[in-house]
């Protein structure tokens, strides 16, 4: 048996190379909250969270309060044969998902350290790199060529285009431009981050189809709480629909499945509360025929690496949404030819 001697939190600031603009927010830098576990025999493991009040509702203050309160109370002094024994009790704590995610990732990292292997190996991922998209932020038409050319030059072939609420003519003009710039063999995904109404979305999709613009899927066009709107959109369009902000928990997923609302799910550890609940969501989604891709918030390398390890374990040959560390000025994760390297932590 081993035991947890103490847990603590620390914060660092992360800066981005260019502003990350979506219809929900603009990010230029952010605080990274690290959760550190130290065992009685001197092993140290970390997990991470960031605040995303516009998305999860979880503020820095609340995340720190939970990590240094309920989660510390649960973990400090506890003994275990495998740290994964502690993840169930953690997932049931009355704490915000972002805080639980940081602690759950730390427990997985600790288990990997105890077994002297990488997190990706612990999760069953044999890949050394994975395909990822890269985000094209909300931008004016005139800014798009430069944004796209930079991403093409760095080898990306899948583009997640963020669109705001704007005229459909303008959105279509942007998509035509992007398609011309990236070529026919690249993939375009669209993510309005809840900014659209049902009628706007239906009109947009009709225009996309009539203009012959090929997109891989449309992610979360309508507000998170309006799950039935996703179902209506899916029934009326041939374009595949992905849920992001509408799906945080298993309960959300089950509602979406009952409504037959989605083709795909974007799983993020800060929404689900870590790897443990995410794995359960993957199982339930797949049973219902819903395809799962893994994404992340604008996070630190530890959070992105954990998400990538999960992605590599559950769907190694899909194109995930793991470009967050590409945006950072101080990334320790390598990106090349549209792939994220998983060699950062061995
Ligand atoms: Mg999204």
Image (cartoon, rainbow, N blue to C red):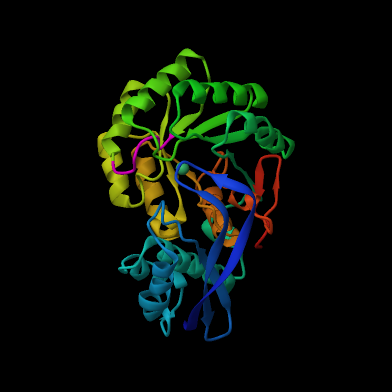
**Taking 103 as reference, is 299 left or right?**
right
Work out whether residue 275 or residue 236 is closer to the camera in this orientation and state it.
236
Residue 226 can be seen, yes or no: yes
Residue 298 image point, x, y percent: 54, 53
**Does residue 287 belong to the magenta stretch?**
no
The secondary structure that dominates the magenta segment is: loop
275 or 183, which is in the foreground? 183
Q: Is residue 138 left or right of residue 219?
A: right
* Residue 40, x across and y down, in percent: 52, 86
Quarter of the rendering containing residue 57: bottom left
**Which residue occupies 38% across, 27% down?**
201
Residue plotted at (44% across, 31% down):
218
Q: Quadrant of residue 233?
A: top left
Would residue 260 be visible to someone looking at this image? no
Above or below, 180 relative to 197: above
**Vertical side of 199 occupied by 155: above or below:** below
Relative horizontal placement of residue 328, taking residue 57 as reference (left or right): right
How many numbered markers are drawn?
Answer: 0
Q: Quadrant of the C terminus?
A: bottom right
Q: Is residue 212 above or below residue 272?
A: above
Residue drawn at (41%, 56%) of the image: 53
Q: Where is residue 69 drawn, in percent x and y?
A: 37, 78
Question: Residue extending furthest top?
Answer: 210
Q: Is residue 179 left or right of residue 294?
A: right
Position above or below: 112 against 142? below
Q: Position of residue 31 (x, y in %)?
A: 54, 64
Question: Which segment is the magenta one?
Answer: 219-225
Q: Does the magenta portion include 220?
A: yes
């Amino acid at each position: 048996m081993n035991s947890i001697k103490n847990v603590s939190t620390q914060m660092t600031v992360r800066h981005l190379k260019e502003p990350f603009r979506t219809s929900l927010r603009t990010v230029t830098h952010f605080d990274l909250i690290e959760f550190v576990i130290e065992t009685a025999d001197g092993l140290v493991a970390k997990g991470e969270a960031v605040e995303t009040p516009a998305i999860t509702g979880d503020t820095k203050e609340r995340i720190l309060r939970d990590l240094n309160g309920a989660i510390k109370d649960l973990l400090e002094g506890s003994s275990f044969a495998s740290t994964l024994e502690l993840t169930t009790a953690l997932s049931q704590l009355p704490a915000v998902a972002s805080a639980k995610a940081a602690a759950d990732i730390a427990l997985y990292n600790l288990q990997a350290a105890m077994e002297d292997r990488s997190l990706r190996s612990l999760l069953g991922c044999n890949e050394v790199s994975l395909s990822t998209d890269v985000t094209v932020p909300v931008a004016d038409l005139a800014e798009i060529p430069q944004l796209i050319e930079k991403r093409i030059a760095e080898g990306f072939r899948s583009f997640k285009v963020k669109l705001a609420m704007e005229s459909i003519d303008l959105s279509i003009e942007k998509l035509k431009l992007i398609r011309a710039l990236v070529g026919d063999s690249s993939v375009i995904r669209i993510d309005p981050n809840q900014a659209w109404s049902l009628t706007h979305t239906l009109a947009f999709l009709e225009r996309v189809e009539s203009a012959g613009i090929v997109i891989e899927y449309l992610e979360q066009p309508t507000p998170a709480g309006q799950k039935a709107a996703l179902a209506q959109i899916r029934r009326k369009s041939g374009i595949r629909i992905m849920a992001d902000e509408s799906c945080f928990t298993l309960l959300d997923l089950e509602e979406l499945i009952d409504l037959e609302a989605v083709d795909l799910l974007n799983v993020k550890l800060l929404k689900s509360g870590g790897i443990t609940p995410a794995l359960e969501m993957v199982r339930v989604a797949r049973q219902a025929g819903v395809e799962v891709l893994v994404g992340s918030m604008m996070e630190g390398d530890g959070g992105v690496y954990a998400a990538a390890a999960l992605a590599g374990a559950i769907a190694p040959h899909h194109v995930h949404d793991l470009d967050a560390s590409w945006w950072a000025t101080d990334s320790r994760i390598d990106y090349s030819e549209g792939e994220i390297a998983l060699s950062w932590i061995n």
